[in-house]
Amino acid sequence: MCKDDGAGRDGREAPAPLRPGFALVDSVKQHERYGQLTLVNSTAADTGEFSCWGQLCNGYICRRDEAKTGSTYIIFTEKGELFVPSPSYFDVVYLNPDRQAVVPCRVTVLSAKVTLHREFPAKEIQANGTDIVYDMKRGFVYLQPHSDHQGVVYCKAEAGGKSQISVKYQLLYAEVPSGPPSTTILASANKVKGGDDISVLCTVLGEPDVEVEFRWIYPGQKSYGTFDSSYVPLSQSEQLGARIHLHAPVGVVQQDERPVTIQDTWRLIHRGLGHTTRISQSVLIVEDFEMVDAGYYICTAQNLRGQTSVATTVEFS
């Protein structure tokens, strides 16, 4: 139940589903001074933080009232489950030198003793409170991750004479600092004859778990910069250390606009000493080069931390 001492309506949010069988929202009831959320078929996977907040409304336009928010952490117990279930049997945790990393071994029994273990060489990793701490709501937190922490780890929980092993986690060290994309651009040729083909490659080196989106502006576009493209996966191959996504444009090319092919790919690369980097690339291909194709080719790469634009010139020869 979420109470509000002021006017307005209550909003509601619940933890994202961790696996199939996540509890159903039976009802959300709004009253004058409070709102009530009811769950049915709850399991250990529903363990997590539930939040609610008031909304300030002006007619049909409402916004969240940041001054009136509340949250509570709820543990759902389930027979035979000491850990909050994971959606997979193996997961990857990236270790970044400039922020904390979390091995999400959360338990559903408050009295459980939880320890962290390295698979090889086999040993217990001490949560000493300086480098690594255990937070029941988050898991084992690496306060200052470094390359020595990488490897395969798992957690062990003991409670009531029973013990359980968690899923395994591959810890990978990421050497690229956080920030807007570090972007480069390269054309296969800067002087092109009529009828030849040309490709322009835009490359980003970044953090393994940070996705990059690309946008292009090129001379053959109608109004020189209004190409509307969206991307759908054509093929996908996921393998630890070599994850690749291939996309092709499905945007409609407007009349009087030069057709191009755009392909986006990304993969993880190991750069020695256990460092892992994500390389994201977008290639724009122009076939049967014409005079209208000469000019600036501009690539904009964007992630959650900002965007970077780079350009190169291609001349008609």
Image: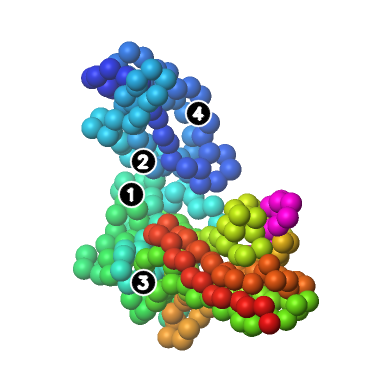
Mark 2 neighbour density, 10 Å: few (under 14) some (14–19) many (20 or more):
some
Query: For the residue marked with disc 1, what is the amino acid?
Result: Lys
The image quadrant of residue 178 is bottom left
Query: Could you tell me which residue is drawn at 32 percent across and 72 percent down?
Result: 97
Mark 3 or 2: in front is 3
The numbered mark, 3 or 2, whose residue comes first in the sequence reads 2
Which residue is disc 3 drawn over?
177
Which residue is disc 1 drawn over?
137
Residue 25: give its label.
Answer: 4
Query: Could you tell me which residue is drawn at 35 percent across and 29 percent down?
Result: 63
Q: What whole-number distance in Å separates the C-alpha atoms at marks 2 and 4? A: 15 Å
Residue 71: give its label.
Answer: none
Residue 305 locus on image (x, y percent):
39, 59
Q: What whole-number distance in Å separates the C-alpha atoms at marks 3 and 1? A: 27 Å
Q: Mark 3 and mark 1 in contact? Answer it, CB < 8 Å.
A: no
Q: Is residue 39 positioned above or below 126 on the image? A: above
